[in-house]
Image (cartoon, grey):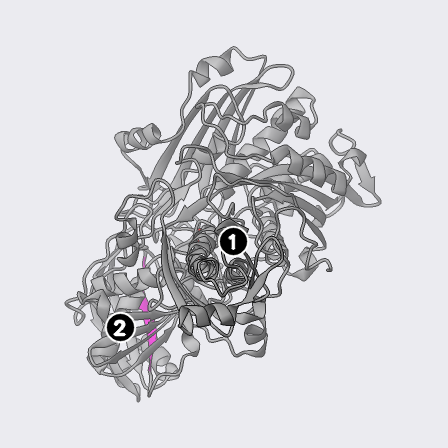
Amino acid sequence: MNRAAPEPKANMGKPAPRVEGRAKVTGEALYGSDFAVRNPAFAFLITSAIAKGRIAQMDLSDAKAVPGVLEIFTHENTNGLQEVPWSKGGLGATSSWQNLGPEIGCDGQIIGMVVADTYEAAREAAYLVKVGYEAEKPSATFDSPGAKVEDENETEQRSKELPQAGNADAAIASADVIFDAEYGTPTQHHNPIELFTTTCEWKDGELTVYEPSQFVYGVKNTVAKKLDISPDKVHAISPFVGGAFGSKGQFSPRTGFVAYAAKKLNRPVKLIATRDQGFTIQTYRAETRHHIRMGAQRDGKIVGFTHEGWEITSRPDPYSVAGVEDSARLYNYGTVKTRVTLVHADRNTPGFMRSPPVVPYIYALESAMDELATKLNMDPIELRRVNDSMMDATGKQWSSRSLMKCYDQAAEAFGWSQRNPKPASMRDGDWLVGFGCASAMYPTHVGAAAARVRLLATGEARVQIAAHEIGTGIQTVVAQMAAERLGLPLSKVTVETGDSAFPPSPVAGGSNQTASCCNVVMKACDAIREKLTHAAITSNESPLAGKSASQIRFTEGRAVSQDGNEEQLADLFKRLGVGALEEYAEFLPPGATPDAMKQLYGGKPYLGGGSKGEKLMYALGAEFVEVRVNALTREIRVPRIVGAFAAGHIMNTRTARSQYMGAMIWGISSALHEATEIDERNARYVNDNLADYLVPVNADVQQLEVILVPEEDNFVNPAGIKGIGELANVGTAAAVANAVCHATGVRVRQLPIRLEKLLV
Ligand code: MOS
């Protein structure tokens, strides 16, 4: 055991090294654009230079003259492509760039695609395409002229589905202490290291799509819809993904364009979009605004909470994250009023980005909690303790809740008791020192999933499930689950994922994947175990004859009874007269409709849990940050961060720590670095490259500690697993903001916190 491989505590799995680790570091692991296809042609996208208006004409003559150009696809020669409409929580990413124009809905919209013998020729030709536009003045963001606040009745309709309890306005008005503030978060782009790529190959009327994806069944079914062919004719392959964070979960029309081009040219076509194109051809995290009001008693008990949010979206698609669903549940406020309003601008449609609802909304809430604590002259941890409850204001119970355990363990490890509560009171030479803390929360989702498990008489097992290795270690945790249930060493289990030929798992989003996959694999393994057990206890020749099934365990390739009798797997298989047992299993979480499995096969995942079920199901955590702000330059550093997290059964302490660690770093990034800058005149992203879009590097991350807090919760699902991938980057930005305020006395309510905001 070492720091990277924490000792498992109660109810935690071993820190097995990643089963795919070797393939990744040796370069053997194939990512979407690595697959070799026969004689590929190369595509380069043409994107719009205006954000709003219409293509008047396109002059392709210079572009076509570039040697090696095979075809240029535009709105004029791509008839027959269908629309994959955007849907709420659905898998079509956008309505804006379905048909390459001529209408333009956002800057950087895909308006054409050059295909050539070489990448260089395609790129050169794309730059030579002359586009004449009828441009209109675009609206970029909040407060831009022409940005349209959605109709009041749409906001009202949404409010009806959001948490509301009692009369929060009245409770706040008559409270001892009233707090009222506004917060804002910027546009952010995922920027996974692996770019957005698509390779399409047709053979005998069947299409194979190689594409980094968080949902291969989504790719399969939506590309079929786009091309108006049967999904049976489409095979989607995505074994490894080089970062996604939500950006590769929804269907991109580019896949349809590449598939269409490959068919027309009767040749495989490979597209690798550029980094800057990734800013407009995919989704992003939209900017948000928040108005929070709270009323509290002198002792800190909150009696009323209102949280109003505003979010930017595109003109056509009402995408919202509406994280008041979560902020209104984190504490029991007594009364709650929430509301979320969308503002439509001339932008590409936003979409999932790591912890979509909670990152902005919990930043606002947890900043407000810190401000309220200051106002009450209370320790911020104690304010959370006073409002900690197993029930929320709407009367819903938590399935399990270890928030204060997380606070206590993290506070201890961090040395919170060293904090002088007075702002701007701690100093080390030229550095102002601040301590801050905040809560992390993420809804526990679990989805319908299917899997196939085969156990051989030799004691080797193979699991097939169309799950997605997006960096989370899914193959490892699924292998651990199979090894544990079948009583095999981990090295004897092979897990195959990322292929629509395997049984479907849900979109690898909403942190559901480990829970969904492990539950269904457990079910399949248990069915195999049952058959083997039955063979043993019902045969007179078996040393296990006559034992009851519940007495039999499987371990190290043997079935063992409580009194120590045992039989080798090979002998059990001989008894059955077969060389292998295979089970196909389907898992439906509570709340799933009977047709959820059919829907999943058709490319629509069902995810249950969070606040939607009978009980509140969430993973929780607490993060503590030390910041140092230079007294002269106002440079901001984060020398230390400690996070403690509780998320039910942890399958693997190594991969769990890795997830938490990466997420906390992203949280620091969200607090101090990341923002997509928008040129408001043109509704255009300005810093659309990794030089100008700031992300943290090693020098920005110093001491980082992850504490795994044991928690048992078998209500959430049979395996007791809560998702963790999107937990630890929630609340971090507030913890940093709170620490900055403690260091300097300056409260920054608009992310990111940069030194110019501290020059006051
Ligand atoms: Mo994640 S943003 O739910 O793909």
Amino acid type of disc 1?
A: Lys
> Residue 627: x percent and y percent?
71, 44
725 sits left or right of 124 in the view: right
Residue hosting label 1: 547
Q: Nearer the viewer, residue 298 or 137?
A: 298
Residue extending farthest to the right is 429
265 sits left or right of 332 in the view: left
Q: Are marks 2 and 1 in contact (CB under 8 Å)?
A: no
Residue hosting label 2: 259
- At label 1, counting other C-alpha atoms closer than 10 Å, the crowd grade (few under 14, some 14-19, many 20 or more) is some
Q: Nearer the viewer, residue 294 or 125?
A: 294
- Ligand 1 under 8 Å from disc 1 Cβ: no
Q: Is residue 48 magenta?
A: yes
Amino acid type of disc 2?
A: Ala
> Residue 743: x percent and y percent?
73, 38
Q: Secondary structure at mark 1?
A: loop
Q: Quadrant of the N terminus?
A: bottom right
Residue 129 in view of the camera: no
The relative height of residue 437 versus residue 262 in the rendered view (above or below) is above
Q: Quadrant of residue 196?
A: bottom left
**Magenta residue span:** 41-50
- At label 2, counting other C-alpha atoms closer than 10 Å, the crowd grade (few under 14, some 14-19, many 20 or more) is many
Marker disc for residue 407: none
What separation in Å lies between label 2 and label 1 (alpha carbons)? 58 Å
Q: Indicate which disc, 2 or 1, sits on the residue closer to the N terminus.
A: 2
Q: Is residue 195 magenta?
A: no
Number of numbered callouts drawn = 2
> Residue 265: x percent and y percent?
22, 82
